[in-house]
Each structure stands twice: as structure tokens, then as C-alpha cells.
Image: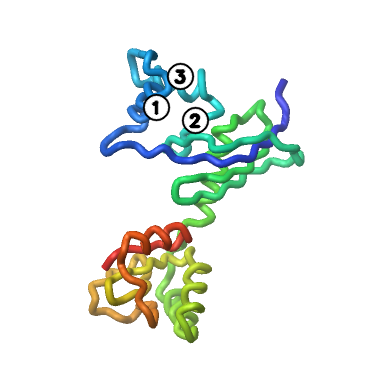
Amino acid sequence: MSETVRYKGTLKEIKPNDNESLKELMKRVVISLHPDRSFKSLEEYEDYLLYEKYHETYFVINEKLYKTLNIKECYYEDVDKFKATVKCNTIDFDVEYYNGSCGLTEAINDAVNEFINKHTPKIRTLEDKKWLMYNFNQLTNDKERWEWIKNHQDCNIIIMLDNDDTFGIFEDHDYDGSDQSFILQFDYYIGCKDGVFELLKAMNIKCDGV
């Protein structure tokens, strides 16, 4: 019988190997779970993993394969709800829907797309950038600057890391090292190590090397 349901949980992305397609990845997962299983086509491996055997364990979300870390059915509030938080390789979701017209995978996809649309950087005009630069330049120390960067990740800002410099630019700014017009400069550099990149990414701060 169709009814309103609510599920909360966390998914973790399963990374493909180099040049491995999504369907090839699903085949590899099935074989790792059931070495004795063999199908003729990649589509049959996909059906077995997503719809027959593990339909509440493995999900394809925005063309990426995820596995459930935890999932639970919760008391529903009788309102459509599609909420998700997308991190580096996990998705936290809280979805409520009528299962007569929607499935769990579709609900999570809708929640993820809503999150992505909300957090997609907006195109900034020249006047927008000047106003942002003015606000940034009013800050007096790097603690305030990092907090500002964290709170303005919808502004097309990317942090550039070098061994002796740390600064921000707008993603659509063609930086060649000579134009300092739209540089968000920090007092102290934090280096250009792998650990620094991973830390900033974990904080959802976009970064790149110079």
C-alpha cells in the first residue's frame, strides 16, 4: 500500500578506478560481493546491484555510486521534504515523500540537486566583485578573513596556495600573476601541501595551487 515515508541516513561514494565507467564499477562491486555470480551484460550487473539484491544499500546519485553507511525510517511530518548535505565523498540525507509516486533513490537525487543548486556559485558582476573586495579589505586579520571566505563560498572565490603566499581570486578571473585588482590577500601563507588542500576541501573551501 502506498504511503508517506521518511528516511534519514548517510551514503558514502565508491570511487571508480581510472577510466572505469559507472557500470563497470557496479560489475566490480557485484563480483567482490559474489565471486560466483556471473552475468552476460553490464546492465544485468546493474539490475542485480541496484534493483534486485541491494536496492536499499547501493544508490546511483548524480551518476556516482554510493553505499549506505546508515539509514533509518523515521516518523514522518506529512510534508514533502528533500534535504541533503553533500560533502567530499558522503551525502547526509533526510527525505520524506509519498512512495506511490516517488522512490528513495529519486528522493535522494532530488535532495542532492536542490543542495547543489542552492550552493552553486552565482555569476558576479564587476560591481559585485568591487563590493566584495571592499568588504574583504576592511578585515584586519587573517582569522576574520578566513571566516569571511568560509561564509562567502557562493561568491565564486577560490583560494590559491603557494609555498610562500596565500590569496583568493574569483574563479572567472584570468589570473596570470600581474593583475592585482581582484586579489584577496592574506597576511600569512599556509603552504601548498596535500594536507592543506584536504583540510580546505573538508571545510568546503575551494582551493588550487599557483
Is the Cβ of the residue at disc 1 closer than 8 Å to that at disc 3? no
The residue indicated by pointer 3 is 48
**Tag 1 secondary structure:** helix
Is the Cβ of the residue at disc 1 closer than 8 Å to that at disc 2? yes
Residue at x-position 47% and y-position 56%: 120
The residue indicated by pointer 2 is 58
The total number of labels drawn is 3
Task: Indicate the amino acid at tag 3.
Answer: Tyr
Q: CA distance from mark 2 to mark 3?
A: 11 Å
Which comes sooner in the sequence, label 2 or label 3? 3
The residue indicated by pointer 1 is 29
| Mark nearer the viewer, 1 or 2 | 1
Task: Indicate the amino acid at tag 2.
Answer: Tyr
Category of crowding for the residue at label 3, using alpha-carbon neighbours closer than 10 angstroms: few (below 14), some (14–19), many (at least 20): some
Q: CA distance from mark 1 to mark 2?
A: 10 Å
Task: Indicate the amino acid at tag 1.
Answer: Val
- Left of 174 or right of it: where is 198? right
Is the Cβ of the residue at disc 2 closer than 8 Å to that at disc 3? no
The part of the image, by quadrant, that contains residue 181 is bottom left
Question: Could you say which disc has been placed on residue 200 in the image?
Answer: none
**Tag 3 secondary structure:** helix
